[in-house]
Amino acid sequence: MTESIPVITVSNVLEQQLRSVDPMRGKVLSLAFAEHVVQVCAGELTPDQQDMARVYLGTAKALFAGEASMTALADAAAAHAKVRVAGSRLAEEILWVTVLAVSVCWQRDLVREGLSRGELKNVTVRTVAAEAQTVVRRYTGGRESVWQLTHLLETADRIDPQLMINLVDEVDAERASSLAAEFARHALLTHPGARYFQAVVDDPDHLPLAVVARQAQHMVGGTEATWQLIRLVETMPR
């Protein structure tokens, strides 16, 4: 019996990337993931819940810049807790993501300063990501993991080139042809006279996707590799 080869999915790429982020970046990503959940699922929240969630997350973020205090965060947490249970069960679960995100950032500090009675254990950015995916899927049916991975890539200081290699290797022939043409058209936006990329658009099956991707990165430079990675992610299987 032939052993099946695991298919790379958005979820396992995201999991891998989140495991490798440093603690500070994990905190920043946790708040971003929670903010996006509040935005996407705003229709399930009451106006008071929306307002308090934004104040709670905003205060947690302001602490990083020294523009808020632990006391202010404790006050925001208390006000947030009162409205968190005032709506639907799904609304409560949505707002729980914000609690987890703030806990990743500041819960130990709040406990140490006597401003919180309990500490959530073993909460990481991966916890926040997973909970966010669950509530967004329940509310919209959407793939929150795609947004999360895209956001991670867009905000990264550096992306391991091996990630592009791994994702390109997973692309089937039909998708490779489509992506090769798309990568070439994108390169033509900044280099409209480049015959190489026009030839790829005319015959996208002529060259391997990896070759077209590297040529476009070399020609366009800047964030082209990141743009390509995001397009790969957006077309990956569930």
Image (cartoon, rainbow, N blue to C red):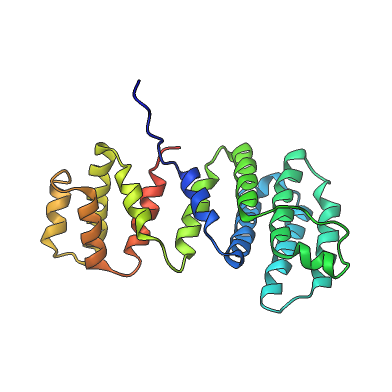
4 vs 234, nearest the viewer = 4
Q: Residue at x 85, y 56 (%)?
A: 118
Query: With respect to residue 166, does 238 lie above or below?
Result: above
Image-based side of 123 in relation to 181, left or right: right
Image-based side of 1 in relation to 202, left or right: right
Q: Residue at x 66, y 53 (%)?
A: 38
Looking at this rendering, what residue extends furthest in the bottom direction?
Answer: 66
41 vs 20, nearest the viewer = 20
Residue 213: x, y in percent?
Answer: 25, 56
Q: Residue at x 35, y 66 (%)?
A: 223
Residue 212 appears in the figure: yes
Residue 190 appears in the figure: no
Place residue 100 in its image quadrant: bottom right
Residue 31: x, y in percent?
Answer: 64, 60
Query: With respect to residue 94, does 6 lie above or below?
Result: above
Q: Residue at x 21, y 54 (%)?
A: 212
Place residue 229 in its image quadrant: bottom left
